[in-house]
């Protein structure tokens, strides 16, 4: 089982719009089968995400993860959550439950950045896919400072997609952690650090 995160990011570095939509939603060419989504999901059997990313799915016109088991990290179970969705407030325990349920397929770590960092810090993040969109969004949430700037990334492959995006796939490798003193995450306010 590999845990693979895939974040769409605007060309000016935002993973959400200023109003909190995932940046991919701002791309007019976005559809269920666009942007390499089917290829990414091929081989995935579960979706893992934070409560903030999960909640909008409850009022969505269509269920976003029809063929995947869904695991949600959050302090409470949002009203209307379908019975088959697993929720847990403890990341290590949720990871255990994810592994116990695993049948050999991969896990799509949907996001958001805080939940990606949580599982990275547990040593459970195997891949980070960035989908760089041909869009300037101008504001919103960034991947950092939520994701540690000391995350070790090793380039695996890249490709241009028909919609004009570029997909970059990194293996996450602690041995490749950048040691540069120019990288200092101590400026991050305590309120913005993951628990
Ligand atoms: N660009 C993309 O591809 C993409 C993909 C997915 C999401 N997004 C965007 O990302 C944004 C949300 O990201 P986010 O990072 O703010 O939220 P998130 O990771 O989706 O969810 C955060 C919540 O997860 C729980 N959580 C996270 N880390 C935890 C930990 N260490 N211990 C216990 N609980 C923990 C907490 O739930 P409780 O508050 O219940 O305790 C926390 O409030 C949304 O605007 C979404 O649109 C973008």
Image (tube, rainbow, N blue to C red):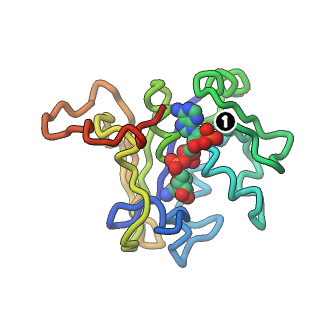
Residue at (56, 69) in percent of width and height: 25
Which quadrant holds residue 104?
top right
The residue lying furthest to the left in this view is 181
Q: Quadrant of the N terminus?
A: top right
Say which of 189 and 172 sits in front. Answer: 189
The residue lying furthest to the bottom in this view is 28
Q: Residue 12 at x, y = what percent?
A: 32, 66
Q: Residues within 10 Å of mark 1 (few under 14, many from 20)?
A: few
**Secondary structure beneath disc 1?**
loop
Dot 1 beta carbon under 8 Å from ligand 1: yes
Residue at (83, 39) in percent of width and height: 84
Q: Is residue 111 left or right of residue 167?
A: right
Which quadrant holds residue 180?
top left
Q: Is residue 117 left or right of residue 73?
A: left
Visible residue check, residue 108: no
Q: Residue 143 at x, y = what percent?
A: 40, 50
Vertical comparison of 102 with 134: above or below: above
Say which of 183 and 96 sits in front. Answer: 183
Say which of 193 and 58 sits in front. Answer: 193
Residue at (35, 46) in percent of width and height: 145
Visible residue check, residue 146: yes
Residue at (27, 30) in percent of width and height: 176
Which quadrant holds residue 101?
top right
Q: Residue 30 at x, y = what percent?
A: 57, 71
Which residue is disc 1 drawn over? 75
Q: Residue 156 at x, y = what percent?
A: 36, 42
């Amino acid at each position: 089982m590999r845990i693979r995160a895939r974040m769409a990011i605007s060309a000016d570095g935002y993973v959400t719009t200023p109003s909190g939509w995932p940046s991919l939603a701002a791309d007019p060419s976005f559809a269920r089968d666009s942007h390499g989504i089917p290829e990414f999901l091929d081989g995935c059997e579960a979706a893992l995400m934070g409560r903030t990313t999960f909640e909008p799915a409850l009022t969505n016109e269509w269920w976003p993860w029809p063929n995947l088991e869904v695991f949600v990290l959050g302090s409470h179970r949002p009203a209307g959550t379908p019975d088959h969705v697993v929720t847990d407030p403890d990341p290590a325990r949720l990871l255990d439950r994810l592994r116990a349920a695993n049948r050999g397929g991969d896990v799509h770590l949907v996001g958001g950045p805080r939940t990606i960092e949580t599982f990275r810090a547990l040593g459970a993040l195997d891949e980070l896919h960035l989908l760089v969109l041909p869009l300037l969004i101008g504001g919103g949430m960034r991947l950092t400072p939520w994701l540690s700037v000391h995350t070790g990334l090793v380039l695996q492959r890249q490709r241009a997609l028909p919609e004009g995006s570029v997909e970059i796939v990194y293996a996450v490798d602690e041995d490749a952690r950048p040691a540069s003193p120019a990288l200092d995450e101590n400026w991050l306010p305590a309120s913005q650090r993951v628990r």
